[in-house]
Structure formats: C-alpha cells, structure tokens
Amino acid sequence: MTSPRTPSAVMKILTGPPGTGKTYRAVREAVHAIDPTVPELEVLNVHTDLQKEGRIVWLTFHPSYTYEDFVEGIRPVEDGKGNTLFRTIDGPFKKICKLHRTRLILSGDILMNAKRPPKPNYEVVYSGDDGISVVSYDDRASIVNRSAQKFIPMRLLEFAKRQGLDPEIFAQSGGSPTEIREREEAAHQLNLSPTDLINASHIRAAYNAYLNPPLDRAPVPIVLVIDEINRADLSRVFGELMTLLELDKREGATEEKRITLPYSGEQFTVPATLSIIGTMNTADRSLAVLDYALRRRFTFVEVMPDPNLCAGSYGGLNLGAYLTWMNRVLTALLSRDNQIGHVDLMEPRLEEVRGQEGYTDDDDGRLRAVAWTLRHKIAPLLLEYFHEDWRLASRVLGDKGVDALLIPQDFSDVAALDNNLDIRSSYEMEDWWNPTSMAWDEERFKRYMSAISSVGVPVTSSPAASVPTVTPPTPTTVAASPAAAPAAPMTPAAATNPADPDQEDPDEE
C-alpha cells in the first residue's frame, strides 16, 4: 500500500460521449490524485485498497439527489424501543471531509479494554471537532467489520471531562448502580436517550482517545468520485458549499472560509486535501447543464472516442475505420458530443459478448459478436439520438443504397384497408444480420461492413474539414435485399439541417 502524502487537490470533470471509458479513467485519476507514482499495472489493486480505507468514495448522481442526501439532512431513526426520533444524519460529502482530520486509518493506536481480554479491539478511525468515531473488531479478523463503527459526539466527551467522570464507567453497558446513574445523568443533561450510551465500550475507547490524543494529526489525501455528475441539479446539491470548493477558500488556505451548516449548526470547511473527480455524459442534453459558477471551479478534460483502441482486425473487419465513419456522419448531422464511444468495439468487450452469447471461436462467431453489438448497443443509441428517425440512423450505420441494416417497414396491407389512413414511417431490422436468426448471412455481413470501413475518414482529419461525399460501392459487390428500399448516399447537402422539415430530402424526390 502506498504511504500517505499531501499532494495538491484535483478538481476535474471528465466529459465526452457515452462509451469512451470515462468511468474507467476516473479510477486512474482518483488513485493518482492520492499518489501519482502508482504504476499503471497496479492502479486497480491500489484503488481497491484505498476504497476499503475510505479514502476513495464513489457516488452516482441522479435527478432526485439533494443537498440532504449529499451533505446532511434530518432523518427518522429508531431508538431501540420502538420510538422514532429525528436526527441530523451526515451525507457522504460531510463524512469524507471528516477524514482529513483522521489521526489513524486502520493502522495505529488500538485502544484496548485493560480489564478484559483484548477482544474486541477498539480503534479510532476519525477524530474531529464534532466527535470521535471508534471501530471495534476481533483481532483475529483480517478485515474490520464496519458495522461495528460508532460515532461518539464531542458534547458527550466534553461533559464527561467537565464532570470528572472515570472512563471506567463506560467500560460496559451494565456496571454498578452508581455507574448506571452517572451515565443516565449524562444522557439527561445532554438531551440524549439512555440508549445512546448502550455502546459503552465504544464510548470508553473514544473517551480515552479524547483525554490522551495522539500527536499525529497529519491530514491525508482523499478523493470523492462523482459518476454522472450532471444528472443532478448541482446548484441545489452543493448549495452554500460552492464557495468552499475553491482551493484558496479551503481549510488552512490564505482565504479560508467557514460556513454554518443549516441542520446541525456546525461550523464547516472543506479540507485542502479533498479532490473531486466527476464524469459527465455530453450526449444527453436533457440533463442539467453545469452553471458557470461551478464550471470555473473544475478543470474539464475531454475523453473522446479513440478508433485506435477498437479491434483492428476482428473477424476480418477493421472496426476502427467503421467507428471513424459513424462518428464523422454523427458530427455532421448532430454534434461532436453525439458520437459513439470505442468501448463496445474493443476486442475484450466483443470477446465477452461472443462468450456470453455462445458464439463459436472463429470468424463467424466474431462477426456475430459485432452484429450483436450493432443490433443491441449501437443501433438503439442512434435511434435515440435521432428520435426514432430510422433514415438518419441508417445513414450513420452505413446505408449503401442497395443494402441497409434498417429498412422501411411494409404497411401496404394496412393502407389497403383505408386509403385515408395516415401511415407513419417505421423501420425493421433485416434478419440477414441477426446473429441469432437462421437467416444470418456471414458473407453478406462481412462484405457490407468492409464496404463501409473502406470509406472511413482518417482520425487525424481537421475538425473543420467538410463532410466527405461518399460514393457507394458498385451494387454488384453486395447482395441485394428484395425488401430494402433504395436510399441515397450520404452527401453534405443532406447533412446540412436534418431537423428542418422544409428541407428537401433526396429520398422523397
């Protein structure tokens, strides 16, 4: 395990279309925010260790996520006697901020109960202005049981010290009548339920730590990773913490700021060693947009599709060239934020699909895995991008005029019932590229995909370059589909404004 150090905090959001590996990269960013010297091959193992220590915490935002979920809020709790009490409960952000004052993280002074055999052991895992958290575990266990962690509020410890109470009164939940009476009196004066003192041995360990604090109070680097950070209303989630996120407003900084939390009334500041790393899907415009106040507190790093990471020759196909083609057309029709990521076309992912679906370990099985990915991953995403406009989705997939993966659905039998019916245009997927169908045609699918890949544009092309006019291969190179309606090849004119209903469509001449 790496040794604690205090690097500069990182405030970074990884942005890009879906499927570009943002979450995977966030793992590496989180580890390197704590220790940038960790070798690439050890990142995953170190990340797992740091998660167990609580120094890397993962969250996923969603539209109903609130300040009360993130920082603190009032929640109902049971007192053990069937009564419901309302308490201020810390959220994950407040909890991880407390770790910067951690004196020992699963490694140091173990507070033993001197009057009993040393089982269980007690260990301080957090010590701050609001209280002390103690964890108990059997010394035979290799992993701490986190359910045995108890938080002891500072007001209880301060009261015990003012009253000159002997730590031994917290040695057990029972004790002499005098010890029981002293505990009940402490609970009464502190407006606590006697059940709050049930975990007497934890209190004793915390009380001893309070009376004899260790000298080592060095802060430790900690990381909060927020996946899908733009799925929540960030102004409402962060609230007044927006100011404290700035590095020069944090604890110990020249312009340190503190706020009073609305529910607990505690004075709060953000530690200088807290890094926040987020991931953001740029394709979904229905999600909350980051406001400028939050944007300027983060560095934004694009994670875009990389065709070089796709399988170079999988089942005889150049999937990197095919991905390049699709993303060129998507950029022209929509935007560079609405591209297809490389993850689903990488060889490990395709091999995973091939194994799960039971396809054979040969070119036919690999082509079926590609077809399955197009059919169940990429085509649905394209139809969502284009709001079910199958004609535009078909062009991205590589409509070659005489053959297409999406074809118009035949409603002639319905129209024959009534000529006045308003028949909507719909689509269907041909069975010849359905990997689970008896009509699956390996050679036809391979010819089709190879033809599309051959017109792919190099990834080094200038972003300002115009969309290429693509001339489809000669029809004789691909077997024709009787049910497929001919479609015009992709041209710059057709890509100018696909959302304009007044624009002429080459298919509707």
Image (cartoon, grey):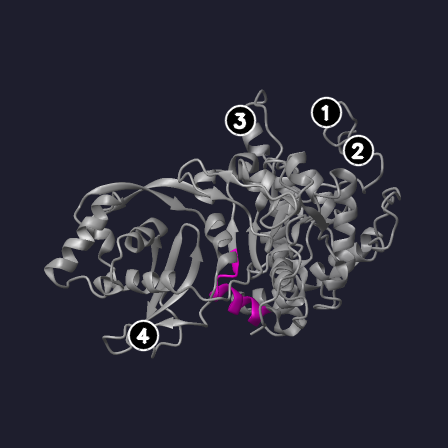
Give the farthest residue toward the left.
177
The answer to whether any part of residue 129 appears in the image is yes
Establish if 249 lies above or below 423.
Answer: below
Q: Is residue 123 magenta?
A: no
Which numbered disc flags the more N-terminal residue, 3 or 4? 4
Which numbered disc flags the more N-terminal residue, 3 or 1? 3
Q: Where is residue 375 in the image (x, y as percent from the top left)?
A: 61, 53
Which residue is tagged 3? 417
Q: For the C terminus, give its image quadrant.
A: top right
Identify residue type, mark 1.
Pro
Identify residue type, mark 3.
Leu
Establish if 6 lies above or below 398.
Answer: below
The residue tagged with tag 4: helix, strand or loop?
loop
* Disc 2 from disc 3: Cα separation: 29 Å
Q: Residue 501 carries which label?
A: 1
Which residue is tagged 4? 138
The quarter of the displayed image where residue 309 is located: bottom right
Q: What is the crowding at mark 1: few (fewer than 14 residues within 10 Å), some, or many (at least 20)?
A: few
Identify residue type, mark 2.
Pro
Image check: 350 left or right of 186?
right
The quarter of the displayed image where residue 486 is located: top right
Mark 2 or 1: in front is: 1
* Disc 3 from disc 1: Cα separation: 29 Å
Which numbered disc flags the more N-terminal residue, 4 or 1? 4
The residue tagged with tag 3: helix, strand or loop?
loop
Identify residue type, mark 4.
Asp
Q: Position of residue 301 (x, y in %)?
A: 72, 50
Which residue is tagged 2? 506
* Magenta segment: 44-57
Which numbered disc flags the more N-terminal residue, 2 or 4? 4
